[in-house]
Image (cartoon, rainbow, N blue to C red):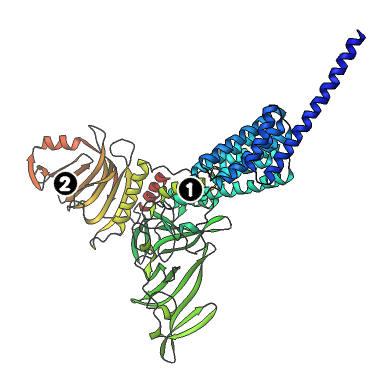
Amino acid sequence: MMRKRQYCILWAALLCVLLCACGDGYRKQLEQGRLQIARGQFEAAVATYSDVIDKTSRNADAYEGRGNAYAALADRAKSYGTEQNSYRRAALMDYKKACELDGGAEYTRTLVNYYLRLGDEALSATQDDAALTHAYSYEIADSYYRAAIDLDSTSGAAYSKMVALLLAEGKSGEAAALLEKALAVAREPAFVRELEALSAQIAQQDEQARRADALRLLRSVPYYGDPEACRMSAAQAVACAKLLSDGVRGKFYGFSGYGKPLYDKPVFWDEPYPVLGYGSYETDRGRVMLADLAGDGVPYLCLFSTMTENNSFEIYGWVDGQMKLAAGEESWGGQQNGTLTELPDGSVVLVEAVTMSGRTHSGQTFRFRDGGAFVAESWYEARENGEAVVRVTRDNTQLTYPRGQWEPVSGVSPENREAPYTSFADTLPGACPLRDMVSYLNDWAAAVSDGAAEYVEVPPEHTERHRMATAMLRQLFALDHASMDANTRLCYVRLFDCNGDGADELFAAFSGAYHAQNGAECQFVLYEWRDGELREHPGGTRFNELYLARRRADNARGVLGTETRGMLTRYGYTFLNGTEEFQADSTKNQYEVLKGGQAAAIAESEYVVLKGQYETLERLVDFRQLSEDRNYERVVTSLYNMRS
């Protein structure tokens, strides 16, 4: 038994000696292969390493060495040719086999580095006939970098290259997600810093993408200036949208310039409101555009009237985190006129000029900056030593020019007075409705804030009741200020519901004859809102008194006009669905129905029946003794309240 144990020990020792001898032989071949690679003898190195692999298929160093030889042969081959691809596949197979046999960090690192190297080479391939297309090179690099990450999930280099590749492809969302994972697992300080630098690039790319989206939106918006230079922030866009929304909802009083709103009440920017200046007119703020008036990329919000030319507008600028009124004009047809003017150098100025007896005698020029409008120059005409001169204040310096050398049309220096100045309003015919601009601004704010900006609700369209009240207000203004006969004036107005539908009709009475829309003369008019428009129902003429009346058959209300001349009494009833007129002469006991100016006799009994169909409720107007109280302001207030 003892002899058998000694025999086993002897054979074990002999086997160990034999294995060491073989190992020494492989080490020499492995070293030989390394030297061959160093000398550029790549085919010989492949043969040397292959001999070792043939003798023992489990030598990881031999596979790694042969992989290095194949990689070198691939480098020497034509880029992305069949031969090169064959060598690269062979190198990858050997590196993978080495990892499989040993699993050590050294072999894993070799394979990871080769994946990264192949990815880098794919991105730097030249675009000749055998090279990759740009998109395909990204695809190949992507596959190699991801393979490296799968092999070593802590490789900072692999993550860094993959994140950079995703950024190059414009996939900032994927890059950000991968970067977050990378920073959690990366160990090497140098690569951590590199990944942190990529984080800044991701943020920059996201911002550039947002600005690009916003710029595409801006190209569809009425905009004056260079859209590429626009620096409007999400906060500014939201503030502009809120301003417009408030204007459409009637949260502003009308702008007062040379002309001022007729009523001291809020106005709705997208609806007409009356203004008194040098005469009377209607205006609104129905169209809007963004305009880089200062040339600094921060646009002003410019609101223009759809009803007058040039001299009815408001301009709001960004000041201290708010949109504030910078400038405005309300001077249509007056002795003061303000015009936004584009100068030859591309800048925009607001020129105000004051005229007297048809001649301009003073003015000032405003320039825009920092969200405001500032006087750059002012001037006025004077006489000096008996000569007409113009005194100009510019840059805190006072200058005097002979009147013949000064042309105040532009309000700028005399050396530029021959320049063909353009009305600013003419440069942007595409100004849009206010609600459309609110939508544009919401889209812009969302684009530049990645959806984080506050959304401003687009104001709903005005209700039917609101539009009715607006139409009646306009009609009242027209009746009170339109050119009528010298002997005709609006003497009384009233609101009452004629047909019981809950909506008031407008009653207007005139001293003297008023010419209705159909050309007929009348002394009063009923205005009914029907099918989205205001319809006119004119009454007769030559009445002494007007009454609110009720028709007994259907409880409808209308207007009774009475005329008394001696013993003749005429009654004219006007309702929304028709009129009826009849008269009685008590002296002659004659009774007649009047139609189309023709009289038809009727019996007294018929007359009694006719008169009994109606009931008088309230006297509205006694033309023989007109009151100073026209009820005008109360009706205006009621109509404004309807809109609120």
Mark 1 or 2, nearer chain start: 1
Amino acid type assigned to the residue bearing label 1 in the image: Asp
Residue 416: x and y in percent read 41, 78
Q: Residue furthest right?
A: 2
Badge 2, how many Cα within 10 Å: few under 14, some, many 20+? many
Residue that sits furthest to the bottom in the current view: 385
Give 237 or 283, whichever is nearer the viewer. 237
The answer, for residue 246, to whether it is visible in the render is yes
Numbered tag placed on residue 570 in the rendering: 2
Front in this rendered view, residue 382 or 571:
382
Q: Is residue 249 visible?
A: no
Residue 128 at what x, y percent from top left?
Answer: 48, 49
**Does residue 242 appear to the left or right of 425 in the view shown?**
right
As drawn, the residue found furthest toward the left would be 601
| 108 vs 193, nearest the viewer | 108
Label 1 and label 2: CA atoms lie apart by: 74 Å
Per the image, the residue denoted by label 1 is 213
